[in-house]
Image (cartoon, coloured by chain):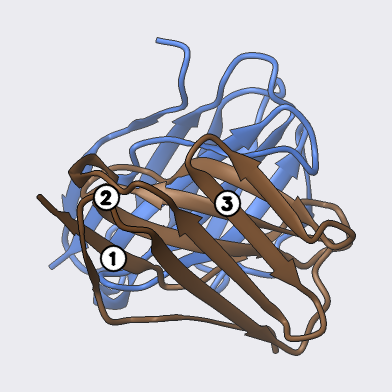
Chain colours: A blue, B brown
Amino acid sequence: GAGVSQSPSNKVTEKGKDVELRCDPISGHTALYWYRQSLGQGLEFLIYFQGNSAPDKSGLPSDRFSAERTGGSVSTLTIQRTQQEDSAVYLCASSPGLGDEQFFGPGTRLTVL
Amino acid sequence: SQKIEQNSEALNIQEGKTATLTCNYTNYSPAYLQWYRQDPGRGPVFLLLIRENEKEKRKERLKVTFDTTLKQSLFHITASQPADSATYLCALEFSGGYNKLIFGAGTRLAVHP
C-alpha cells in the first residue's frame, strides 16, 4: 500500500528484554517522526528525522531509547532493557517535508510484562 | 513547558447538529496548529492546518478558528453524522516550523442518530 506501515503490530515482551520497532514511511517523504501514546493520553513526541539525521532527540524518555533511519527511508526505534512503563502504542508518521501534514502509521502496541 | 488542554469529557450530540471542540494552550506561540481525527486502534488522520496569521480555515463541513490572543482554537463540524464519531486531537507546532508537534489528549465525539 501507499501509506505508512509499522511492524510488528503487537509486541509482548518481558521486562529487561530489548525490542525493535520498525517504520516504513511513504516513499519520497523526507521527514519521519516517532510518537508514543499511552492509554487515554495524547501523543508524546519522541524524535524526528530529516533525511537520515535526527536534529531533535529531546523527546526520547531515557538513554534506553534510540532510533535510526537509513537510506532516508526505513526507521527503527530500539528500546533496551524494557520496563513496564514503556508499555504504550508507538506511532510513526512521515511528511513530504518539514511543515507539512503528517501521515501516521497504525502503530505498534508494546506490552512489557 | 507547553501545555495543551482539550475537554477530556466526551461530547455527545444529536445527528445534524454542529459539534464544537475546544483546544486551549499556554506558554507558547505556535507557528501553526493542526487537527487530527483518531479512530480506535488506528493512527491519527490529518484534517486541517491553520497558521498563526489565519483566523479561520474551512474544509467541507469542517471549520477551524485560531485566536492567538486567547490562545485557543475551536473545531466545528456542521451537520454532524454518526460517522463523525471519533476522538479529535489538537496539535501545536512548537519548533519554529520544523513540524515538531505537541498533541492534546483529545476529545471524544459521539454523534447519535
Q: Position of residue A53 (x, y in %)?
A: 79, 41
B12 and B102: which is toward the camera: B12
Q: Position of residue A36 (x, y in %)?
A: 43, 61
Residue B25 lies, with reference to residue B75, above or below; the image says below
The answer to whether residue A100 is seen in the rendering is yes
Badge 1: residue crowd in 10 Å (few <14, some 14–19, many ≥20): many
Residue A82 visible? The answer is no
Q: Position of residue B3 (x, y in %)?
A: 61, 85
Asked whether the residues under marks 3 and 2 belong to the same chain, the reply is: yes
Which chain is home to disc 3? B
Residue placed at 35% from the left, 46% from the top? B79
Say which mark, if any, is on residue B47: none
User: Quadrant location of residue B72?
Assistant: bottom right
Q: Which mark is residue B63?
A: 3
Residue at label 2?
A: B16
Q: Which residue is mark 1?
A: B108
Write down the chain letter for disc 1: B
